[in-house]
Amino acid sequence: MLIETDFETKIAALHRRLEQLPGAVVAFSGGVDSAMLLHACKAALGDSVLAVTADSPSLPRAELADAELFAAEHGIEHVILATEELRRKGYRDNAPDRCFFCKTELFEEIAAQIARVSEAGWPVLYGAIPDDDTEHRPGAQAAVQHGVLAPLAELDICKEEVRRYSREHGLATADKPSFACLASRIPYGTRVTAELLAQLERAETVLRDLGYRQFRVRHHATVARIELLAEDFERAVGRDRVAISQGIRAAGYLYVSLDLTGYRTGAMNEVLP
C-alpha cells in the first residue's frame, strides 16, 4: 500500500480546494509561485481560468514576455491589464507600505476587468505562500481587504514544494530565480517615478544579457549597488567587470558597486525596525 507524503497530501488538498470554485481569476506575475498556482487551477478547472498580468513601468519587459509565453504554452486565456499605481500618492511616496497601494491598484483593476468579461462570480487568487509571512508584505493586507484568495498559503505549500510541483509537471518556471517588482530596488522615502523604474530596468538588463540569473540592482542616487550570488563574484569582477561597469553607467549611474554580502531578498527592508 502506498502512503501519501505530506507534499502529496497538500497537492491533493489544493486540487480539491480549486475544484470547488466556479472558476478562477489568477493574478499572474509570471513568477514561480503564481505560475504554479495558475497551472494547478488549469488542471482543476479546465478552461474556467483567466490569468491576469498587471503591466506597468515596475514590470520588466522580459518578465512580461515570460508570462505571455507561459500562458500560451498551457492554453490559458491571458489578459494583460495596464495598471497605474504611479497615480497613487502612497505608491509614489514609497513609504514601507508601498506594496499595499500597488496591490490595491491591481486588485481593483482586476475587479473592474472581470466585471467586463463576465467572470464576476469567479474569485481572484494570488500566489502568496507561507514563506512570505517571514517578510515585510503589506500587499497581503490589500489582498485581505479585497477578498483575494491565497490557496497556497492556506494549505501551507512552501517555496520548496512549489518548485517540486513545478519540476514534476515540467513547468519552465521550476528553477526560475525569485523576482520582485522594480520598485523594490528603491530605498524607502525615495520617490518612485517611471523614469527611475526605466533606469533600473536598463541596469538590470545588462546583468540579464550577460547571463546572470539571480541578481538585483539597488538604487542609491548616483550609485548602483549590485547584488549577485557569491559564486558569481569572481566572474563579475573578472571577465565581466568592464561590461557591467560600462553598461550600468550607460543606464544612468555614475558609480557601480558590488555588494559583498551578496544577493538576498528584501535587502531594502533591512533599514526597518
Image (cartoon, rainbow, N blue to C red):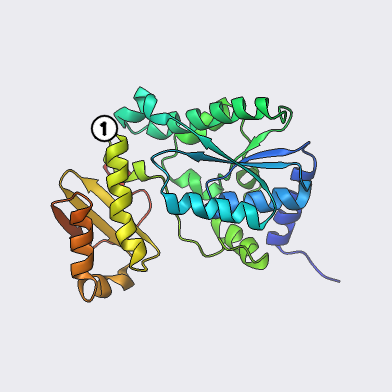
Using residue 182 as the reference point, say whether residue 53 is left or right of it.
right
User: Residue at image x 32%, y 55%?
Assistant: 204
Choose top left, top right, bottom left or bottom right for residue 165: bottom right
Choose top left, top right, bottom left or bottom right for residue 111: top right
Q: Quadrant of the N terminus?
A: bottom right
User: Residue at image x 55%, y 32%?
Assistant: 143
- Tell me, yes or no, if residue 157 can be seen here: no
From the top left corner, tell me how far across and down residue 163 is, in percent: 58, 61
User: Residue at image x 26%, y 58%?
Assistant: 226
Using residue 214 as the reference point, say whether residue 70 is left or right of it.
right
Vertical comparison of 234 with 146: above or below: below
Q: Quadrant of the C terminus?
A: top left
- Tell me, yes or no, if residue 72 can be seen here: yes
Q: Secondary structure at mark 1?
A: loop
Taking depth in this image into account, of 144 and 193 the one nearest to the observer is 193
From the top left corner, tell me how far across and down residue 51 is, in percent: 63, 43
User: Residue at image x 78%, y 48%?
Assistant: 46
Vertical comparison of 223 with 232: above or below: above
Total marks drawn?
1
From the top left corner, tell me how far across and down residue 180 is, in percent: 42, 48
Taking depth in this image into account, of 131 and 128 the one nearest to the observer is 128
Query: What amino acid is labelled 1 in the image?
Result: Arg
Toward the left, the furthest residue is 254
Q: Provide the residue designation for mark 1.
A: 191
Using residue 260 as the reference point, say whether residue 91 is left or right of it.
right
Taking depth in this image into account, of 253 and 156 the one nearest to the observer is 253
Q: Crowding near pointer 1: few (<14 within 10 Å), some, many (20+)?
A: some
From the top left corner, tell me how far across and down residue 63 is, in percent: 47, 52
Choose top left, top right, bottom left or bottom right for residue 101: top left
